[in-house]
Image (cartoon, grey):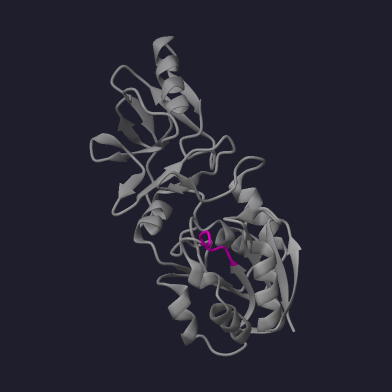
C-alpha cells in the first residue's frame, strides 16, 4: 500500500490554522505531519496551501482524533471491521493507536517512539537480522532502521493496522529509499509464519504482542520454543509484557513469561516493562 503524503490535522492544529487566517496572517507555521516535520502553509480566503496543494479550512474536529484528506473532505484515521481501530494523537507528536478504546502503546511518560527506541537498544540491532513479531505501527522497525539494522522481518496480522501505518508519517515505509530493502513487512500471523524460518536464522527478536487475553498463543510455551529455535545462540530477545510485576487478571504475566523463556532455552530477566532474554 502506498503511503499517504497529504496533511494530517488534529483539533489544535485546525484551530491554529483558522485562528491565523482570522487575524489576517498570510502564513502559518507548525506541523502538518504530527510533529514528524516542521511545516508552513500559505493562507488565503479560499483555503490554505501546503506542498503545492490547496486545501479547504476544516470545520470543527473532534478531540483525540487525527484527520486526513479523503477526497474533498477530512476523514478520521479510523476503521471499523469487527473492532474500532483508530490512530490517536499524543502530546509527543508520534501517535499511538487504539483497538476498541484500548491504548496499544505506552504514552504517559514519553513519546511511544522514544519508548520503542529504548527497547530496541536492548537487542543492539546494528548489523543484525532482526525478527519483529508484531509490527503494530512499526516503531520498533523504524528504530532498528535508524540504528543500522542489516535486515528486519516484521509481521502484522491486522490489515487495518497496516492501513494505519500508511497514514502515519512516523511508521516506516518498506518501499522508501531509507529502508533500502532492509525492512520486510508481511501481512501474516507470526505464530504460524515462524515455522517457515530456518533454525538460528535471526540475530535478535523484538516481541510486542497484544495483551495475554487477546493473543494467548503468543505467550505459549510452543511459541517461545519456536523463538528459541530461530534465534542464534547469544542472540537477544526483548518481550514486552507491560509494567514489571503488574498483575493481570490476578496473574504475574512478566514472571510467567520469564519462566517459560527459561524453559525454552533462554537466560531471562525483567527489564523496562518486559523481559530481556539471551539464547543459551
Indicate whether 152 appears above or below 252: below
Indicate whether 12 appears above or below 140: above
**Quarter occupied by residue 19:** top left
Residue placed furthest toward the front: 250
Classified by dominant secondary structure, the portion drawn in magenta counts as loop
For the question of whether residue 1 can be seen, the reply is no
Indicate whether 5 appears above or below 187: above
How many labels were placed on the picture? 0
- Could you say where residue 48 lies in the image, as x and y percent from the top left? 36, 26
Q: Residue at x 44, y 9 (%)?
A: 23
Q: Residue at x 66, y 68 (%)?
A: 256
Point out the stretch of residues depicted in magenta: 207-212
Q: Nearer the viewer, residue 188 or 55?
A: 188
For the question of whether residue 33 can be seen, the reply is yes
Left or right, residue 15 beside residue 239: left
Q: Residue at x 72, y 56 (%)?
A: 272
Amino acid at each position: 500500500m502506498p503511503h499517504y503524503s497529504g496533511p494530517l490535522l488534529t483539533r489544535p492544529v485546525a484551530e491554529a490554522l483558522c485562528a491565523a487566517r482570522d487575524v489576517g496572517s498570510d502564513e502559518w507555521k507548525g506541523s502538518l505531519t504530527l510533529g514528524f516535520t516542521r511545516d508552513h502553509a500559505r493562507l488565503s480566503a479560499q483555503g490554505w496551501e501546503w506542498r503545492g496543494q490547496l486545501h479547504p479550512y476544516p470545520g470543527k474536529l473532534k478531540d483525540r482524533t487525527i484527520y486526513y484528506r479523503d477526497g474533498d473532505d477530512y476523514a478520521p484515521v479510523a476503521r471499523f471491521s469487527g473492532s474500532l481501530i483508530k490512530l490517536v494523537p499524543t502530546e509527543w507528536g508520534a501517535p499511538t493507536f487504539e483497538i476498541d478504546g484500548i491504548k496499544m502503546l505506552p504514552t504517559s511518560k514519553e513519546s511511544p517512539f522514544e519508548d520503542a527506541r529504548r527497547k530496541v537498544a536492548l537487542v543492539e540491532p546494528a548489523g543484525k537480522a532482526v525478527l519483529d513479531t508484531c509490527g503494530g505501527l512499526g516503531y520498533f522497525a523504524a528504530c532498528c532502521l535508524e540504528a543500522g539494522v542489516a535486515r528486519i522481518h516484521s509481521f502484522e496480522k491486522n490489515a487495518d493496522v497496516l492501513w494505519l501505518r500508511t497514514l502515519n508519517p512516523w511508521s516506516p515505509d518498506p518501499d522508501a529509499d531509507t529502508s533500502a530493502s532492509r525492512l520486510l513487512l508481511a501481512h501474516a500471523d507470526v505464530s504460524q509464519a515462524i515455522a517457515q524460518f530456518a533454525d538460528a536464522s535471526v540475530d535478535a527478536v523484538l516481541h510486542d504482542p497484544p495483551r495475554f487475553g487477546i493473543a494467548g498463543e503468543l505467550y505459549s510455551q510452543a511459541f517461545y520454543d519456536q523463538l528459541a529455535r530461530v534465534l542464534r545462540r547469544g542472540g537477544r530477545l526483548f518481550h514486552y509484557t507491560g509494567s514489571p510485576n503488574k498483575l493481570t487478571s490476578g496473574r504475574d504475566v512478566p514472571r510467567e513469561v520469564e519462566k517459560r523463556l527459561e524453559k525454552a532455552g533462554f537466560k531471562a530477566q525483567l527489564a523496562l516493562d518486559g523481559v530481556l532474554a539471551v539464547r543459551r
